[in-house]
């Protein structure tokens, strides 16, 4: 069995780490010796570029949240198109995430990450140059492919460099980075569209220079060990099938009850094809040598339940930022910048809980108690947000959002950590991508479902209020899925009625999210509590982790 020396810390410190890199996967009796964990300084130097990339990807994902009402008004978009401008990016990133994750287990993670950032830059520049809504949706999909690489590969690289017991502490940095980026994104987007000398196109163009900066830092600093060499095969058929299945489902969710009825041949055809494609995907994954999502990983109890819980997290992560931004601007009449500031309490809760809980997880060597408490807090936060109406005081919304943010921060990164702790480091990219994939899928489907529910609810509530005004032609401006979101040209009573409909409809979305979050709590309850491993597992499957001593929390 050939072996190579991987110098992960070359140029980063005075110490060289040796890792055995097998040409084939060893049997359980031929386990390679686990490498010596890197020092705190070495880890921080490796994280420097990853955190920049993570910051850029999350800013890019949230920068349009508060800018979307302005962008859609400029382009004449409808409520359905509003949703798809967000969903196209999430769909592309979701569908590409398992592909990037599998590639990261087969090829050089650093090169793949640089390629992914390059795709993101191209998509960002093209999105800023879009001339209509359909072009923007298409270019945002290209941007999403790059985002999928940045989200999945950063998690995979962290899982390859940092042992599980230490990982909770450093995931606190990633959680804080995500939280800060999620605050900065809406603020930057709101500021840009509020400045006539900039314009909405800079919401996309502004990401390019920061992405290029991340590429420079990564090319200079990042050194990642390779645990597997030799023949590598990508399951392109499986990747195609899962992409088509997800796309088919989302298209049906978007157009059902609008372009066609729920009980129609179109519904039967689209749902039937989704089930067939999903079945073919499972069949292919059970046969190929290197599946995109290995079924044994999904059959693991903790991984399957973590995926279920991640769906609730995805709905909270994406749904809250998209629809709260719309609530603040359309319903309450605030500027994009002010709407961004009003999202700060929620993201402050995410940041604080990510930092402190991540350190505690590493200190005690256990993840389940924190994830369970976080899932309960998340459900409670969504439950309180379900009471939001057109007249709810802003301070109350801030408190509700902060509670939900604490729950998000406690669950988001630690669910990934729980899965990484159960698999071999050789499969850490695939396993991390699986959780990220289903979290993004949950967010993508959640946005589409919540968007459809929101549009229908607004339409019916606005129609009743406008009918009461007895203004000729007012009912045509009821704000349904096919109506424009630009209310500036409407008579004041009509605009006010539609704003009230938007404000009184938002609570239903969070009531649905609270129900999904409760299912996440149930999933976490049934997860098996394990201690975090102090060393990497290099075999084909990770054995049950023995009780690990509590980790010291160095300064």
Image: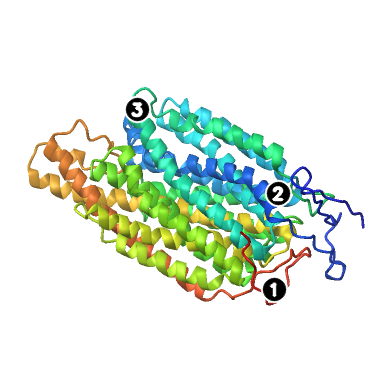
| Marks 2/3: CA–CA distance | 41 Å
Crowd class of label 3 (few under 14; some 14 to 19; many from 20; radius 10 Å): few
Q: Residue furthest top?
A: 197
| Marks 1/2: CA–CA distance | 24 Å
Going from N to C along the chain, the mark reached first, 1 or 2, is 2
Specify the label residue 545 is tagged with.
1
Q: Is residue 58 above or below residue 205?
A: below
Query: Mark 1 or mark 2, which is nearer to you?
Result: 1
**Residue 442 appears in the picture as rendered:** yes
Going from N to C along the chain, the mark reached first, 1 or 3, is 3
Going from N to C along the chain, the mark reached first, 2 or 3, is 2
Q: Secondary structure at mark 1?
A: loop
Q: Nearer the viewer, residue 550 or 35?
A: 550
Q: Is residue 228 left or right of residue 185?
A: right
Determine the residue positioned at 53% across, 43% down.
Answer: 55
Q: Secondary structure at mark 2?
A: helix
């Amino acid at each position: 069995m050939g072996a190579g020396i991987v110098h992960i810390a070359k140029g980063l410190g005075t110490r060289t780490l040796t890792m055995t890199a097998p040409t084939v996967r060893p049997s359980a009796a031929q386990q390679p010796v686990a490498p010596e964990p890197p020092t705190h300084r070495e880890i921080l130097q490796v994280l420097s570029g990853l955190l920049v990339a993570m910051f850029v990807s999350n800013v890019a994902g949230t920068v349009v949240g508060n800018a979307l009402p302005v962008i859609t008004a400029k382009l004449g978009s409808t409520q359905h198109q509003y949703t798809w401008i967000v969903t196209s990016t999430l769909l592309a990133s979701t569908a590409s995430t398992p592909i990037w994750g599998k590639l990261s287990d087969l090829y050089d993670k650093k090169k793949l990450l640089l390629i992914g950032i390059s795709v993101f830059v191209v998509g960002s520049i093209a999105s800023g140059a879009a001339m209509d809504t359909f072009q923007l949706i298409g270019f945002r999909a290209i941007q999403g492919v790059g985002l999928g690489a940045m989200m999945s590969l950063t998690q995979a690289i962290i899982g390859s460099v940092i042992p599980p017991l230490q990982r909770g502490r450093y995931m606190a940095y990633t959680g804080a980075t995500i939280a800060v980026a999620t605050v900065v994104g809406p603020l930057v987007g709101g500021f840009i569209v509020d400045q006539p000398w900039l314009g909405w196109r800079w919401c996309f163009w502004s990401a390019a220079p920061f992405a290029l900066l991340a590429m420079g830092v990564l090319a200079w600093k990042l050194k990642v060990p390779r645990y597997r060499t030799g023949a590598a095969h990508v399951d392109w058929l499986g990747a195609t099938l899962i992409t088509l299945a997800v796309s088919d489902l989302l298209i049906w969710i978007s157009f059902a009850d609008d372009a066609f009825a729920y009980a129609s041949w179109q519904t039967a055809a689209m749902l039937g094809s989704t089930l067939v494609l999903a079945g073919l995907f499972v069949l292919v994954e059970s046969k190929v040598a290197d599946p995109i999502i290995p079924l044994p990983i999904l059959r693991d109890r903790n991984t399957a339940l973590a995926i279920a819980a991640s769906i609730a997290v995805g709905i909270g992560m994406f749904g809250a930022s998209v629809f709260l931004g719309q609530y603040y601007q359309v319903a309450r009449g605030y500027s994009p910048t002010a709407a961004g500031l009003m999202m700060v309490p929620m993201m402050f809760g995410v940041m604080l809980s990510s930092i402190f809980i991540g350190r505690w997880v590493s200190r005690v060597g256990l993840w389940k108690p924190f994830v369970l408490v976080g899932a309960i807090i998340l459900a409670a936060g969504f439950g309180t947000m379900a009471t939001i109406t057109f007249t709810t005081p802003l301070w109350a919304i801030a408190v509700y959002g902060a509670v939900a943010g604490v729950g998000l921060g406690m669950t988001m990164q630690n669910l990934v950590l729980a899965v990484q702790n159960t698999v071999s480091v050789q499969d850490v990219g695939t396993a991390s991508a699986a959780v990220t994939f289903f979290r993004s899928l949950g967010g993508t489907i959640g946005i589409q479902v919540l968007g459809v529910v929101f549009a229908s609810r607004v339409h019916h509530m606005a129609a009743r209020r406008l009918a009461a005004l007895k203004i000729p032609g007012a009912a045509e401006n009821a704000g349904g899925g096919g109506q424009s979101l630009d209310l500036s040209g409407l008579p004041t009573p009509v605009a006010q009625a539609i704003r009230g409909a938007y404000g009184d409809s938002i609570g239903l979305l969070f009531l649905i999210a609270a129900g999904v979050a409760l299912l996440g709590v149930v999933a976490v309850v049934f997860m098996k509590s394990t201690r975090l491993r102090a060393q990497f597992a290099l075999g084909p499957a990770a054995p049950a982790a023995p009780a690990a001593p509590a980790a010291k929390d160095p300064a």
